[in-house]
Amino acid sequence: MGLTGRNASGKTTVVSWFSSKGLRTTSCSDSIRRWLSEQEIEETRDSLIEGGRELRRRGGAGVLAEMLLDSLDGEDAVIDSIRTPGEVEALRKRSDFTLIEIRAGIDSRWGRSQSRARIGDPLEKEVFIAQEKSEEVAKDEAGQALNATAALADMVIVNEGAIEDLHDDLNELWLTLTKPV
């Protein structure tokens, strides 16, 4: 299963929920983090973005997902931070892959961004919006393409309410996914 969505939409919360159910969790960003570490580059939001671009320039649009598939070796997992159609294409090599978009409006996401206070999260709403705009449509093969990636989603979870509402939606999804055929 893979997750895509905008900054602060709730992807990390969804990953944590699936982890509590016993699923392995990983992220396309983990591939970038490993590469940054090997290059002795400090991990920041900007270095993660540029590192992802560099890896895509070198290995193609799906390289981050391909690196994860190699490390998973067939194991089931929830994969966070899918940001390009090339990554979706690489993950669809597994016939059981499902892409879920986590969707929330700008005001909800801005509020969450401010509440979580992650290093690298913008302090001004205008910067938050500008960063998001730069990730919507890829300028080249190496860039992020959130709009095109979201369009490939097999399902959408709208995360506008309380965390309990999100957990209720995830419980319903879990029952569907684990229902015997």
Image: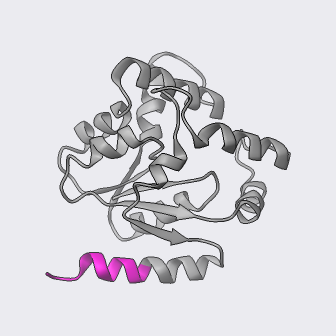
Residue 25 counted in the magenta span: no
Taking the image as shown, residue 41 lies to the left or right of residue 178, namely right
* Residue 138 in the image, given as x and y percentages of width and height: 54, 34
Residue drawn at point x = 86 percent, y = 45 percent: 124
Residue drawn at point x = 64 percent, y = 56 percent: 8
Quadrant where the N terminus sits is: bottom left
Helix, strand or loop for the magenta stretch, by majority: helix
Give the answer, above or below, for where 47 lies relative to 96.
Answer: above
* Residue 119 in the image, given as x and y percentages of width and height: 71, 41
- For the magenta stretch, what is the residue range? 171-181
Give the answer, above or below, for where 156 lies relative to 117.
Answer: below
* Residue 61 in the image, given as x and y percentages of width and height: 38, 31
* Residue 58 in the image, given as x and y percentages of width and height: 38, 17
Name the one closer to the observer, 124 or 17.
124
Name the one closer to the observer, 164 or 146.
146
Taking the image as shown, residue 180 lies to the left or right of residue 168, namely left
Name the one closer to the observer, 131 or 32.
131
Q: Quadrant of residue 60?
A: top left
